[in-house]
Every structure is written in C-alpha cells, then in structure tokens.
Image (cartoon, rainbow, N blue to C red):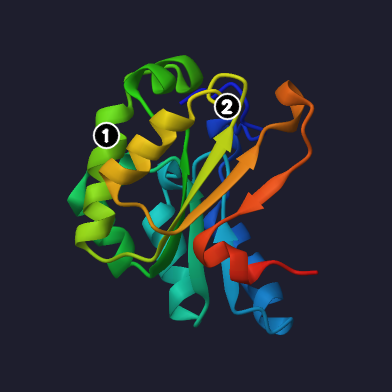
Amino acid sequence: MQCKFCYSSVNKDEEISISRVNEILTFLLSADIKKVILSGGEPTINKNFFRILEILSSSGVEISIVTNGLKFSNKHFLHQSICSGLNGIIFSIKGFTPTDYEKIAGGNFYPLIIKAIENLRNLNVKTTYQFTFSSETINNISDFIAFVTLTKIDNLITQVSQQKLGIKALIYAGWAANQCLT
C-alpha cells in the first residue's frame, strides 16, 4: 500500500536484522519491558517476521503489531503469526468502501481487508481496529457505519487527520475509551 496520509515509509534495505532484534531485546529485558508494539512500514512484510515474533515471545515479551492487515487475509499466515507468538493486532483501516481503498491506499485491497477481518474474528484474535478520518472519508459517516455493521467491529479507535482538516482531535470509542491517560 502507498497510503496518502501514512507517516511511515521503509526501504526494504532498511529492514531490522535479527542481530538488531536481539540487541533491542537485551535492552527491553534489562529495563523490565514486557510488552512491545511492532510497526513500520508494514511489519508483516519483513522477511524475518516470524523469527522476530519467536525471539520476542520466547523471552516472555507480549507482542502486538500495527498493520494494514493484508497478510491476514491468508489464514495460514495468520495462524503462523499466532503460533510464532503474536498476541494482538492494531489493524489500520484505510477506508470504508472499495472506492475509498482505491483512492487512499492505491489499490483494490478492500476484498482482502474484509477477508482479513473475517479471519481475525474466526480465530478470536485480540484486535483493535483504527480508522483515520481524512478529507477523503470525513463526509462518509454513513459508509463508516455500514462498514462497522458489515464487519461487526467492536473494538475501535478513530482519529482525524490533522493535516488535511485542520482539526486536532482524537476520539476514543469502545475498549480504548478506558485506556486514556489524563
């Protein structure tokens, strides 16, 4: 995906190595840090993704990832991720319709996203869904409601892209409402 509002881009040549993962793990354990969130770019496309999960998990670290979710449309990939130690997913949804995905993410990813959501629900994977309202989607609240109804999403964070709309707001709903710090 090449999402218009994404802050994160990673060159394939800059993937984290296993030796670097081990260095970071040593630091995490010395600081008594037991939970990590992997993000990127897209963590699931790292050639060492499963090995990284295994290394962290075998050391007692709880692992979540921020992902576009595409790889989880493949049940085998999802199952292997869980077996490798993945504990939770923050699934970044780019739009609410096939047209939204085409405009925002640059491809026909919508069917894969629907399949990934179905797979996650069927395997009962702890998942938080995140939507960023942007200038392309802010007026599509009815599409948003239809999407949430269709997918039966119940653990949801929404935010508004500040750059395009001039709005500085972060709105929490569901599980996330109880996680806010004052």
Amino acid marked by disc 2 = Ile
The image's mark for residue 143 is: none
The residue indicated by pointer 2 is 138
147, 98: nearer the viewer: 147
Q: Quadrant of the N terminus?
A: top left
Q: What is the secondary structure assignment of the residue under circle 2?
A: loop
The residue sitting at 22% across, 52% down in the picture is 119
The residue sitting at 61% across, 26% down in the picture is 134
Front-lying residue, 18 or 50? 50
65 to the left or right of 74: right
Place of residue 128 in the rendered image (x, y in percent of width and height, measured from the top left): 46, 57
Residue 57 to residue 156: above or below: below
The answer to whether residue 73 is left or right of residue 42 is left
Foreground residue among 98 and 57: 98
C-alpha gap between disc 2 and disc 1: 23 Å
The residue carrying pointer 2 sits among few (fewer than 14), some (14 to 19) or many (20 or more) residues within 10 Å by Cα, namely few
- The residue depicted at 22 percent of the width and 63 percent of the height is 123
Q: Is residue 22 visible?
A: no
**Rendering coords of residue 163 (x, y %):** 75, 26
Observer-side mark, 2 or 1, equals 2
Residue 15's spot in the image, x, y percent? 56, 42
Q: Which residue is mark 1?
A: 112
**Residue 120 visible to the viewer:** yes
Question: Could you say where residue 21 lies in the image, as x and y percent from the top left?
Answer: 58, 62
